[in-house]
């Protein structure tokens, strides 16, 4: 009897773990059912997902914020890549912008507001951007001290336009409208 009890316990455990003796049935979804379930998917915020759902392109303010965040993270080439081809037509111009942005040790967007300055159209906009900036001490000896940037609050007027594929690009960055 002593040898039978452990064997009975092992048999009972394997019986329970296998689904209590029930036969498992594998079902396949019919392609129409699978498609229907995907079309009726619910997102975490309880909005129905449709077949034609597209992710919207970032808007002007999003691009401005991303641009300055990249500079603050030291990702200068990525920030310069967000500029319109007319603002950075060649490698030397890209390098000049890179040198200017590289003097910044930290930068944070305090506010962004649409501006009435310039020709605001569907494909071109200007924003007044208030930034909190920290400059690297070594940049004080630049030809233009700090390339026009100052420690503390800086205001920049950022003009943008959509490129041929509908993506907003930085067109100009100025200290005044």
Image: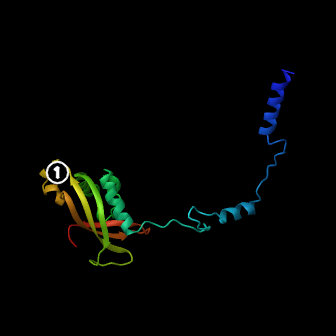
Give the residue at mark 1. Answer: 139
Q: Which residue lies furthest to the top in this view?
A: 2
Residue depicted at 28% across the width and 55% down the height: 91
Give the quadrant of the C terminus: bottom left
Q: What element carries label 1?
A: helix
Residue with the most extreme right position: 1
34 shown above or below 20: below
Q: Nearer the viewer, residue 12 or 78?
A: 12
Q: Tell me, yes or no, if residue 106 can be seen here.
A: yes
Q: Which of 172 and 85 is in front in this view?
A: 172
Residue 65: name its quadrant: bottom left
Q: Quadrant of residue 40 in the image?
A: bottom right
Q: In this view, does 144 lie to the left or right of 68?
A: left
Point 80% across, 42% down: residue? 19
Q: Where is residue 123 in the image (x, y as percent from the top left)?
A: 38, 74
How many C-alpha atoms fall within 10 Å of the one at disc 1: few (<14), some, or many (≥20)?
some
Q: Is residue 11 above or below residue 160?
A: above
Q: How is the image coloured?
A: rainbow
Nearest the viewer among 64 and 88 is: 64
Q: Where is residue 140 in the image (x, y as percent from the top left)?
A: 13, 52
Whether residue 89 is visible here, answered yes or no, is no
Identify the residue at image location x=74%, y=63%: 32
Say whether residue 52 is left or right of residue 104.
Answer: right
Residue displayed at 31% across by 59% down: 68
């Amino acid at each position: 009897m002593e040898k039978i009890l452990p064997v009975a316990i092992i048999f009972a455990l394997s019986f329970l773990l296998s689904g209590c003796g029930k036969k498992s049935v594998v079902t396949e979804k019919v392609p129409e059912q699978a498609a229907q379930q995907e079309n009726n998917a619910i997102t975490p915020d309880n909005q129905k997902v449709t077949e034609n759902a597209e992710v919207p392109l970032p808007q002007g303010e999003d691009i401005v914020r991303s641009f300055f965040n990249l500079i603050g993270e030291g990702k200068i080439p990525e920030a310069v890549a967000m500029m319109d081809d007319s603002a950075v037509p060649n490698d030397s111009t890209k390098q000049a912008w890179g040198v200017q942005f590289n003097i910044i040790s930290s930068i944070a967007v305090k506010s962004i507001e649409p501006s009435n300055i310039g020709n605001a159209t569907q494909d071109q906009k200007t924003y007044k951007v208030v930034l909190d900036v920290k400059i690297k001490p070594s940049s004080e000896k630049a030809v233009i001290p700090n390339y026009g940037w100052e420690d503390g609050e800086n205001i920049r007027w950022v003009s943008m336009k959509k490129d041929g594929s509908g993506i907003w690009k930085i067109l100009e960055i100025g200290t005044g409208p």
